[in-house]
Structures are given as structure tokens and as C-alpha cells.
Image (spheres, grey):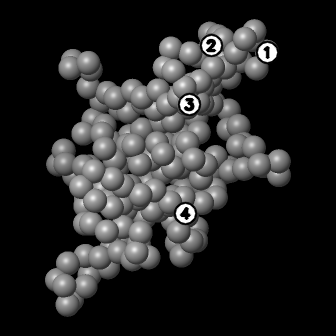
Amino acid sequence: MKKNKASSYVISVGEFDEAESVVGTMRSNHHRTEFTLCNDGRNPAGSHGALLEESHTQELMAVSYESILGFIKLQQMSAIIPHMDRNSQRVCLGDGSLLKKMKNNQGAGLIKLETIVPAWNEEKQEYVMDFNGRVKKGSVKNFQLACSDSPDKLVMQFGRVDENRFVLDYSSPLCALQAFTIALSCFDE
């Protein structure tokens, strides 16, 4: 929609018009620098999985890109996700958006992920990152994420393999939906 300044994505595992196949939705702010991923919003007590006004929509992740003078710096990304409980279920955080909690440094029950800063290579005279052979081509969309409380623990990497293909590797605490939507957000312009 040309007049719509924000982006909205529906992530499904089947046909788009089948409500049962929707696993999440991601929306951006009008600057497209902040994204929020929500679950499908179904009320488990509802019949046939229908979407209800009083649904149990839960925010699963928020991503924020640093913006300087209107230009988005893809390499400066932060993401925030809810912790997992003992039963490997996402902790429900109740009221308040994840983006607001990230901006206000309210980290209780949250895991913050940040991009790993590339290192300067004196010989090549450029910034480089070690993708362990997984990424073959340079791109502004190539990035790695680590937990802010343990920056040595790589939890996601995304990068260009050839002209039209990218590779996405992720590990706990991210799930496939969260990792996919983080990667999807870097394509939004």
C-alpha cells in the first residue's frame, strides 16, 4: 500500500486466507526502524481457533535499528525477547510493549540481543566479521547477534551467500519465527 508508511507482515505455514496457518504478525513503526512480532492472537478457548477481539495476542520480539539523520544503520540493531520458563514456554510479560521496555531498560524477564561490531582489518582496509565460512559475499545486510549479557555467545548470524540467497543460522534462546522475522526486518526499506 503506497500511502501506508508502516510495514505489516503475516507469517503463515500454509495458505494466507486460512486463519489456522498464521503463526505470527510483524509490524513496523512509520520510520521502519522498529518492528514488533506478535503471535497469531488466537484465543485457546475460542472455537476452531478463530481470531477473537479478546484474543491472547502476545509480543514475541521487538527489533530496533539505530537511525542517524534519517538513515538506518543496519549494523546497529538491538532485539529483545521474553525469557523461557522451565517448560520451554515464553514468559508472558503482561501489559506494556517490548519496545517501550527496551527503551526504558526494563529488562526483568527479557533477553536483549545486540549486533556484534565488525573488526577493522588493517590488511584489507575494511571491516570484517567471521561467519565461519557460512557467508560468501559482503553485504550491508550481513550481521551477527549475541546476548548482551554474554557477548561471546553468538545466537544468530545472517548473510549473503550469492546474489539472490542468504543463509540464516540461529540457536537458543531464539526460535525459528523470531530469527526469521529479525532477518525479514533488515529487508524492509
Labels 2 and 1: the sequence-earlier one = 1
What is the C-alpha distance between the residues marked 1 and 4? Answer: 34 Å
Rendered image: mark on residue 51: 2
Q: Which residue does the numbered mark 3 point to in the structure image?
A: 13
Q: Earlier in the sequence, mark 2 or mark 3?
A: 3
Above or below, 107 relative to 21: below
Mark 2 is surrounded, within 10 Å at the Cα level, by few (under 14), some (14 to 19) or many (20 or more) other residues, namely some
Q: Is residue 51 above or below residue 118?
A: above
Query: Which of the two marks, 4 or 3, is nearer to us in this view?
Result: 3
Image location of residue 166, percent across then percent down = 36, 55
The disc labelled 4 sits on which kind of residue?
Val
Q: Please tell me which of labels 4 and 2 falls first in the chain.
A: 2
**Mark 2 to mark 3 CA distance (whole Å):** 17 Å
Q: Position of residue 156 (x, y in %)?
A: 50, 61
Residues 132 and 149: in front is 132
Badge 3 density bin: few <14, some 14–19, many ≥20, Cα 10 Å? few
